[in-house]
Amino acid sequence: MNDPQNRSSNDFFWPSYVDLMTSLFVVMLVLFVYSFKLFKDREHDLKQANGELKAKAEELEQITKIRRSLQRLEGKYFRYDPTLERHELLVPVQFKAGRDEIQDAYKPALLQAGQTLRSVLKTIKTEQPVRYLVIVEGMAARYAGNDARNRSEEQLTYQLSYRRALNLLNFWKQNGLDFSQDSGIELIIGGSGFFGTGRYRGSQEGQNKRFLIQVIPKIGRMTSINLR
């Protein structure tokens, strides 16, 4: 005969066992879903990071191409300074002390230099839109008696060097060289007084009465590439 007590125990065990297995299945299912979500999120992050890296690589490639193209500037009117990473004007412009007028002897070369600069920038071909920031910087020489601690003298020297740069811009415009008409070129003028980098020192201080022209390419923002 079947023992009623054993039958009662069996009747209690199997439902409990089924409930336990069902609970374990639910837990495993939840863990699987959670793990799958983490995997998909991680996969999305990796694809996004990969896309950003690819965009940065393309941007670097564009910058490299532009720098190679800008080498065409080097020659009679410009040279590249690898230390300061800038192109500099080679026309040996000199101003009279305390004056901002460009002497006639320098004007033909300055006009040729401006035309060369504009021509090179307009002929550079790139896959991405590029703008060029052209900085025309006027400079001044520091002579004995020019005390950097003299605030008034310092301000006057900044104004003088700025007017020199402005006169160059106006001279170019008067001769049909208007960079503001070029959508891909943004020209900025400034004056560094008797400060700034790349200055002549000692007995060559007088050569600081000159222009510096820097060209900085600005590549348009690239969007990340979605990889599938």
Image (cartoon, helix red, strand yellow):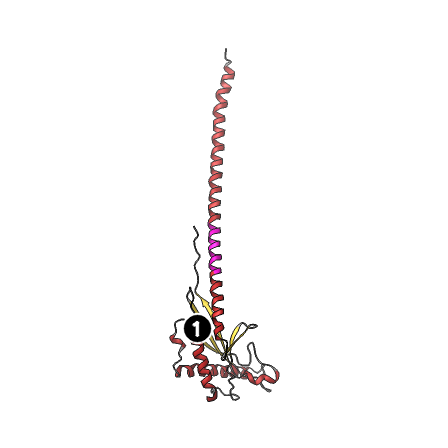
**Residue 56 magenta:** yes
Question: Which residue is at the front of the view, 142 or 129?
Answer: 129
Q: Main secondary structure of the magenta part?
A: helix
**Residue 159 magenta:** no
**Where residue 126 sits in the image (x, y, percent)?**
43, 66
**Where residue 30 sits in the image (x, y, percent)?**
47, 38
Badge 1 element: helix
Q: Mark 1 points at which residue?
A: 121
* Crowd band around label 1 with a 10 angstrom C-alpha radius: few (<14), some (14–19), many (20+): many
Question: Which residue is at the front of the view, 22 or 121?
Answer: 121
Query: How many labels were placed on the picture?
Result: 1
Residue at x 40%, y 81% (from the top left corner): 173
Residue at x 49%, y 42% (from the top left corner): 35
**Where residue 123 sits in the image (x, y, percent)?**
42, 72
User: In the image as oriented, which residue stretches furthest toward the top?
Assistant: 1
Amino acid at circle 1: Leu
Query: In the rendered image of this protein, does residue 50 appear above or below residue 211?
Result: above
Question: In which quarter of the view is residue 153 placed?
Answer: bottom right
User: In the image as oriented, which residue stretches furthest toward the right?
Assistant: 202
Residue at x 48%, y 54% (from the top left corner): 50
> Relative to 197, is 33 on the left or the right?
left
- The boundaries of the magenta stretch are 44-57
Query: In the rendered image of this protein, does residue 41 appear above or below residue 12?
Result: below
Residue at x 47%, y 66% (from the top left corner): 65
> Relative to 202, is 225 on the left or the right?
left
**Where residue 215 sits in the image (x, y, percent)?**
48, 73
Query: In the rendered image of this protein, does residue 28 appear above or below residue 53?
Result: above
